[in-house]
Image (cartoon, grey):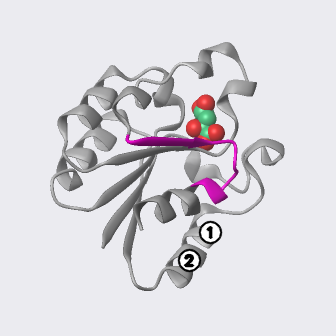
Amino acid sequence: MKLIIINGPNLNLLGKREPEIYGSKTFEDFFKELQLKYKEIEISYFQSNIEGEIIDKLHEVGFDCDGIILNAAAYTHTSVGIGDAVKGITTPVVEVHISNIHAREEFRQHSYISPNASGVLFGFGLKGYDLAIQSFL
Ligand code: DQA
């Protein structure tokens, strides 16, 4: 099984960024733990702060890998382009958010990804990525 985790803007700062919301672990450390836990699956990781690069990555992987775990971060709430890309590909996408976006500001409560995602996980911290992997298994 081939899965990819795609993280959007500012998620490269995990560990340093608002640790009271996002925790104090870097994504790189967490990703190593996931790879050790799920040795039987090929999991790759891509992060970009640039909307078009996220769209390009979805096009690149979205017709042949088995699952995409997407945290589009702030673009979740603004990007028709990423929403359309998720709609246009054939690989199922699970949308993940570390925080409970529905318990935060109103602008975080709309997602352009959710209508086209096969599932959505939010509010479980980094564990949400693990749960998304389990949903594909
Ligand atoms: C986030 C929630 C978004 O609203 C925010 O812009 C992020 C991270 C999350 O994982 O909780 O950058 O996607």
- Residue segment shown in magenta: 118-128
Farthest top residue in view: 106
Residue 74, percent from left and from top? 53, 30
Quadrant for the N terminus in the image: bottom left
For badge 1, the amino acid type reads: Phe
Crowd rating for badge 2 (residues with CA inside 10 Å; few <14, some 14–19, many 20+) = few
**Separation of marks 1 and 2 at Cα, in angstroms:** 5 Å
* SS for callout 2: helix
Instruction: Tell me whether the residue at label 1 lies in contact with that at label 2, contact meaning CB atoms closer than 8 angstroms.
Output: yes
Instruction: Left or right? Give the position of 131 relative to 99.
Output: left
Q: Quadrant of residue 61?
A: bottom left
User: Where 92 falls versus 4 (above or below)?
Assistant: above
Q: What residue does disc 1 label?
A: 30
Residue 85, percent from left and from top? 25, 34
For badge 2, the amino acid type reads: Lys
Q: What residue does disc 2 label?
A: 32
Which residue occupies the foreground of this view, 18 or 100? Answer: 100
Residue 87, percent from left and from top? 25, 32
Quadrant of the picture in which ligand 1 is shown: top right
Instruction: Left or right? Give the position of 81 relative to 70.
Output: left
Quadrant for the C terminus in the image: bottom left
Q: What residue is shown at x 29% (from left), y 25% (from top)?
A: 81
Q: What residue is shown at x 33% (from left), y 32% (from top)?
A: 116
Q: What residue is shown at x 33% (from left), y 20% (from top)?
A: 80
* SS for callout 1: helix
Q: Quadrant of residue 20?
A: top right
Which residue occupies the foreground of this view, 128 or 24? Answer: 128
